[in-house]
Amino acid sequence: MYDIHRMPRVLWDAIAHASATERWFVCGYAPVGQPEPVAELIGNSWEVFGEDEKNPARKSPEWIAYSPLLPVAILAGFDVTLVGASAELADEVDCILNGKGTSLRDLTLRDFGPEESWAFLNTVLG
Protein backbone atom coordinates (compact mmCIF):
# COMPACT_ATOMS: atom_id res chain seq x y z
CA MET A 1 0.00 0.00 0.00
CA TYR A 2 2.78 2.47 0.88
CA ASP A 3 5.68 0.75 -0.88
CA ILE A 4 9.05 0.75 0.85
CA HIS A 5 8.09 3.44 3.38
CA ARG A 6 5.10 1.49 4.74
CA MET A 7 3.22 4.63 5.79
CA PRO A 8 1.75 7.83 4.32
CA ARG A 9 4.36 10.41 3.36
CA VAL A 10 2.92 13.03 5.71
CA LEU A 11 3.52 10.67 8.66
CA TRP A 12 6.98 9.65 7.43
CA ASP A 13 8.04 13.29 7.07
CA ALA A 14 6.70 14.18 10.53
CA ILE A 15 8.57 11.29 12.18
CA ALA A 16 11.77 12.13 10.29
CA HIS A 17 11.54 15.78 11.32
CA ALA A 18 10.73 15.02 14.96
CA SER A 19 13.55 12.46 15.23
CA ALA A 20 16.06 15.34 15.03
CA THR A 21 18.49 13.47 12.79
CA GLU A 22 18.87 13.10 9.04
CA ARG A 23 19.70 9.38 9.15
CA TRP A 24 18.33 6.27 10.82
CA PHE A 25 19.82 2.85 11.34
CA VAL A 26 17.90 0.34 9.23
CA CYS A 27 18.19 -3.43 9.33
CA GLY A 28 16.23 -6.21 7.72
CA TYR A 29 15.12 -9.52 9.14
CA ALA A 30 16.98 -12.75 8.48
CA PRO A 31 15.39 -16.17 8.04
CA VAL A 32 15.31 -18.29 11.19
CA GLY A 33 18.75 -19.74 11.83
CA GLN A 34 20.54 -17.09 9.78
CA PRO A 35 22.59 -14.25 11.30
CA GLU A 36 20.80 -10.92 11.53
CA PRO A 37 21.95 -8.43 8.89
CA VAL A 38 24.08 -5.48 9.94
CA ALA A 39 22.21 -2.20 10.38
CA GLU A 40 22.99 0.45 7.78
CA LEU A 41 22.86 4.20 8.41
CA ILE A 42 20.37 5.46 5.79
CA GLY A 43 19.10 8.96 5.07
CA ASN A 44 15.55 9.33 6.34
CA SER A 45 14.25 11.77 3.77
CA TRP A 46 11.48 10.19 1.70
CA GLU A 47 13.54 10.22 -1.50
CA VAL A 48 16.87 9.04 -0.07
CA PHE A 49 15.29 6.21 1.94
CA GLY A 50 13.53 4.87 -1.13
CA GLU A 51 16.49 5.18 -3.50
CA ASP A 52 19.53 4.18 -1.39
CA GLU A 53 20.81 0.91 -2.88
CA LYS A 54 22.30 -0.25 0.44
CA ASN A 55 19.01 0.22 2.31
CA PRO A 56 18.04 -3.15 3.84
CA ALA A 57 14.36 -2.22 3.39
CA ARG A 58 14.87 -2.66 -0.37
CA LYS A 59 15.71 -6.35 0.14
CA SER A 60 13.80 -7.39 3.23
CA PRO A 61 9.99 -7.35 3.34
CA GLU A 62 10.27 -6.72 7.08
CA TRP A 63 12.63 -4.17 8.55
CA ILE A 64 13.39 -1.99 11.56
CA ALA A 65 14.51 1.64 11.48
CA TYR A 66 15.60 3.57 14.55
CA SER A 67 17.10 6.92 15.41
CA PRO A 68 20.63 7.02 16.77
CA LEU A 69 19.67 10.06 18.88
CA LEU A 70 16.10 9.80 20.16
CA PRO A 71 13.76 7.04 21.34
CA VAL A 72 11.90 6.29 18.12
CA ALA A 73 11.73 3.07 16.12
CA ILE A 74 9.71 1.80 13.18
CA LEU A 75 8.92 -1.89 12.75
CA ALA A 76 7.65 -2.57 9.25
CA GLY A 77 6.09 -6.00 8.84
CA PHE A 78 4.20 -7.71 6.05
CA ASP A 79 0.80 -6.33 7.01
CA VAL A 80 1.34 -3.67 9.65
CA THR A 81 3.79 -0.93 10.54
CA LEU A 82 4.34 0.00 14.17
CA VAL A 83 5.99 3.18 15.37
CA GLY A 84 7.29 3.37 18.91
CA ALA A 85 8.33 6.70 20.39
CA SER A 86 8.57 8.59 23.64
CA ALA A 87 5.45 10.55 24.60
CA GLU A 88 7.27 13.80 23.87
CA LEU A 89 8.29 12.69 20.40
CA ALA A 90 4.78 11.37 19.65
CA ASP A 91 3.38 14.76 20.72
CA GLU A 92 5.86 16.49 18.38
CA VAL A 93 4.80 14.22 15.50
CA ASP A 94 1.13 14.93 16.19
CA CYS A 95 1.84 18.68 16.35
CA ILE A 96 3.56 18.52 12.95
CA LEU A 97 0.65 16.50 11.54
CA ASN A 98 -1.83 19.00 12.99
CA GLY A 99 -0.05 21.72 11.01
CA LYS A 100 -0.72 19.61 7.89
CA GLY A 101 -4.43 19.24 8.70
CA THR A 102 -4.33 15.70 10.08
CA SER A 103 -3.35 13.76 13.21
CA LEU A 104 -2.20 10.33 14.33
CA ARG A 105 -5.83 9.55 15.16
CA ASP A 106 -7.09 10.69 11.74
CA LEU A 107 -4.46 8.61 9.94
CA THR A 108 -5.36 5.57 12.05
CA LEU A 109 -9.07 5.99 11.29
CA ARG A 110 -8.31 6.40 7.59
CA ASP A 111 -6.36 3.12 7.45
CA PHE A 112 -8.34 1.02 9.93
CA GLY A 113 -11.85 2.47 9.77
CA PRO A 114 -14.10 3.43 12.69
CA GLU A 115 -13.13 2.27 16.17
CA GLU A 116 -16.15 -0.04 16.49
CA SER A 117 -14.61 -2.20 13.75
CA TRP A 118 -11.36 -2.66 15.66
CA ALA A 119 -12.37 -5.86 17.47
CA PHE A 120 -9.24 -7.64 16.28
CA LEU A 121 -6.99 -4.75 17.29
CA ASN A 122 -8.66 -4.47 20.68
CA THR A 123 -8.13 -8.19 21.24
CA VAL A 124 -4.48 -8.05 20.23
CA LEU A 125 -3.64 -4.77 21.97
CA GLY A 126 -6.07 -5.03 24.87
Image (spheres, rainbow, N blue to C red):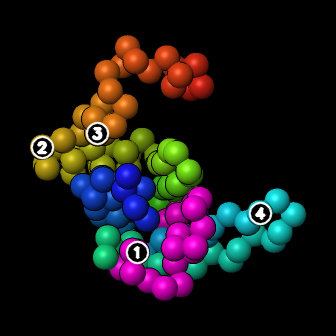
Residue at point 59%, 25% (across, down): 124
The reply, left or right, for residue 89 in relation to residue 84 is left
Dot in front, 1 or 2:
1
Nearer to the camera, 64 or 73: 64
Mark sitting on residue 101: 2
Q: Are marks 4 and 1 in contact (CB under 8 Å)?
A: no
Residue at point 42%, 41% (across, down): 87
Residue matched to label 3:
107
Query: Residue 17: percent from the left, percent from the top?
Result: 30, 63
Please state the total of marks drawn on the protein image: 4
Residue matched to label 1:
49
Secondary structure category for the residue under label 2: loop
Q: Which residues are magenta?
A: 48-67
Residue at point 57%, 62% (across, down): 61
Q: Are marks 1 and 3 in contact (CB under 8 Å)?
A: no
Residue at point 34%, 37% (across, down): 111
Q: CA distance from mark 3 to mark 2?
A: 11 Å
Q: Earlier in the sequence, mark 4 or mark 3?
A: 4
Q: Dot 4: few (<14), some (14–19), or many (≥20) neighbours within 10 Å?
A: few
Q: Earlier in the sequence, mark 3 or mark 2?
A: 2
Dot in front, 4 or 3:
4
Residue 18 visible in the shown view: no
From what the image shows, is residue 103 above or below residue 121?
Answer: below
Q: CA distance from mark 4 to mark 3?
A: 32 Å
Magenta-span inclusion, residue 59: yes
Secondary structure category for the residue under label 3: helix
Residue matched to label 4:
31
Give the amino acid at mark 3: Leu
Q: CA distance from mark 4 to mark 1?
A: 23 Å
Q: Are marks 4 and 3 in contact (CB under 8 Å)?
A: no
